[in-house]
Image: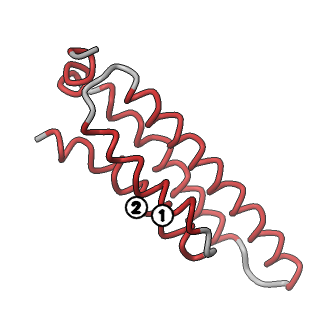
Amino acid sequence: MNFVRLLPVILSFLILAAHFLRYSDFPLMVIALMIPTLLFIKNRWVPRIIQLCLAIGAMEWLSTMFFLIQARQHTGADWQRLAVIMSLIALFTLLSGMVFLNKKLKGRYQKAE
C-alpha cells in the first residue's frame, strides 16, 4: 500500500527524467531516475532528501516555463496555456513531497536509523 502512497513522488521524478531527456541532459535524467530508489531505504533522512529534490525539480519546471514563455512572446505565439500547464506540473512536483506527512509513511521512515 505504501507504493500507492508514493506514486506521486515516483511520477514526479519520471516526468522530470522525461524533461531532461527532451533536452538531452542525460546525467540529470539518470539522477532523476535514480532518486526514487532512495525510497527503499528506511531512514529518517530519506523523506527530507526526496522533498529537497522535488523542490529543486519544481524550480526547474518554473525556470523552463519562464524561458519558454519568453521564447513564445518573442515570436508572438500564444503562451498562456503553456504557463498554466507548466505551473500545474511544478505545483504537482512540489506537492508530491507532502506524501511523507502520511502517518504510515512517517512510521516507515522514522523507525530505522
Residue 72 — which label?
Answer: none
Report whether 22 appears left or right of 108.
right
Residue 62 at x, y percent in the picture: 67, 54
Residue at 32% x, 46% y is 37
Is 36 placed above or below 105 here?
A: below
- In the rendered image, which residue does mark 1 sit on? 17
Report whether 33 appears left or right of 28.
left
Q: Considering depth in this image, is 97 or 25 the residue closer to the camera?
A: 25
**Residue at far left of view:** 1
Residue 54 at x, y percent in the picture: 50, 43
The mark tally for this picture is 2
Disc 2 crowd, CA 10 A, few/some/many (<14, 14-19, 20+): some
Residue at 32% x, 35% y is 99
Query: Hey, what amino acid is under mark 2?
Result: Leu
Disc 1 crowd, CA 10 A, few/some/many (<14, 14-19, 20+): many
Q: Secondary structure at mark 2?
A: helix
Q: Based on the displayed image, in which of its 4 quarters is residue 79 positioned?
A: bottom right
Residue 94 at x, y percent in the picture: 50, 42
Report whether 84 appears left or right of 102.
right
- Work out how far the residue at label 2 is from the one at label 1, CA to CA, in angstroms: 5 Å
Residue 71 at x, y percent in the picture: 82, 76
Marks 2 and 1 in Cβ contact (< 8 Å) = yes
Residue at 32% x, 25% y is 101
Is 9 placed above or below 51 here?
A: below
Rendered-image quadrant of the N terminus: top left
Q: Considering depth in this image, is 82 or 48 the residue closer to the camera?
A: 48
Q: Secondary structure at mark 1?
A: helix
Residue at 69% x, 63% y is 65
- In the rendered image, which residue does mark 2 sit on? 14
Q: Based on the displayed image, in which of its 4 quarters is residue 40 positioned?
A: top left
Is 33 placed above or below 21 here?
A: above
Query: Hey, what amino acid is under mark 1?
Result: Ala
